[in-house]
Image (cartoon, helix red, strand yellow):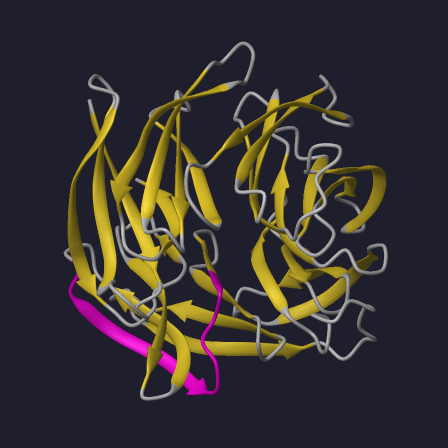
Amino acid sequence: MQQTILLGTYTRRKSQGIYQIQLDTTAKALTNLELLVPETSPTYLAKSQAGNLYSVTTVDGKGGCSAYDANQHFLNAVTEEGAPLCYVAVDEERQLVYGANYHKGEVNVYRIEDDGSLTATDQVFHDEPCGSNENQDKPHVHYTDLTPDKRLAVCDLGTDRVYTYDVSAEGKLTEVAVYVAEDGTGPRHLAFHPNGEIAYLFGELDSTVTVLRYDATTGSFNQLQKLSTLPEGFTGANGGAAIRATQDGRFLYASNRGHNSVVVFAITKEGTYLTSEQWISTEGDFPRDFHLAGEEAFVVCANQNSDNLTLYARDAESGHLTLLEKDVFAPEAVCVYPL
């Protein structure tokens, strides 16, 4: 069986845009890397059910989101002055795309038109106090994606907050709740348990996962547990990156940039408690993203600075990862998106 995996990248050194690579689940190998779409630093990707591809983009010094049809033909780009986005997500029900702008502390909403192109509908800026970490100089929106009940959850690394918004059919945002994390956490990404009642917040700045209970009646989050993503005794610099939960709700995975590892957590049946089970090297430098693939029998990890992908086999019973390949070339890859 062959599964296509898209790779979003920076284009500062070797990369030319969005790539695709094949996961051969029989041979247990990654093969046939090829450039899919020339694009400027498409660092995060999302695809609609119609097959349209949405990508972070930079055009003439302006940042925003590009739209491509199912045949990778360029449709349009919606950009504005300043830095590009760092995250995009598709809302199928409302036919919207959400974007997170880290440098501007901005949430962007775009409407998907009938042809798949985009039109801007709303933008929200945060002005709450920021945390005490040196990287929390201002609001830094890092994640904009749906909750299980179709609200919008937004992680802001700068303000140490997770915001919950109601979204109108026209793509307008109304804030309904705010979770305030511990000072210096640096909320980066959020992953939900399949039960829809528990979420896992990755703190980039303090390398932690916070287990949160999500209340769908109010859109609020409440802390249940917080634990490190690093092994005891590690004292080097590190930044949290990607976080993914399995579809069966039994395991959670997170990547450490600095320690250069993926940590495996076992999840209790209710989803409310984590225990660390394994740390495994990413066999490269700066694992910005990874994803479960091949019906979750594999994990594909992208090492941004060393231009390589690492492939692991995943044991469904123990959750543990076993190295399969470590020197698969992929230039400046920072987003792993299995189709």
Closer-to-camera residue (14/37): 14
Closer-to-camera residue (118/330): 330
Quadrant of residue 104 within the rendered picture:
bottom right
Residue in the picture at 46% in, 47% down: 289
In percent of width and height, residue 24 lies at 21, 26
Quadrant of residue 4 within the rendered picture:
top left
As for residue 270 lying within the magenta part, the answer is no
Quick check: 303 above or below 55? above
Image position of 171 (left or right of 75)? right
In percent of width and height, residue 321 lies at 48, 21
Q: Quadrant of the C terminus?
A: top left
Image position of 50 (left or right of 271)? left
Image position of 213 (left or right of 236)? right
In percent of width and height, residue 324 lies at 33, 23
Image position of 110 (left or right of 261)? left
First to last magenta residue range: 72-87
Quadrant of residue 123 within the rendered picture:
bottom right
Quick check: 135 above or below 20? below
Residue 313 visible to an observer of this rendering: yes
As for residue 83 lying within the magenta part, the answer is yes
**Residue projecting furthest to the top:** 317
Quick check: 38 above or below 4? below
Residue 148 visible to an observer of this rendering: no
Closer-to-camera residue (284/130): 284
Residue in the picture at 25% in, 62% down: 15
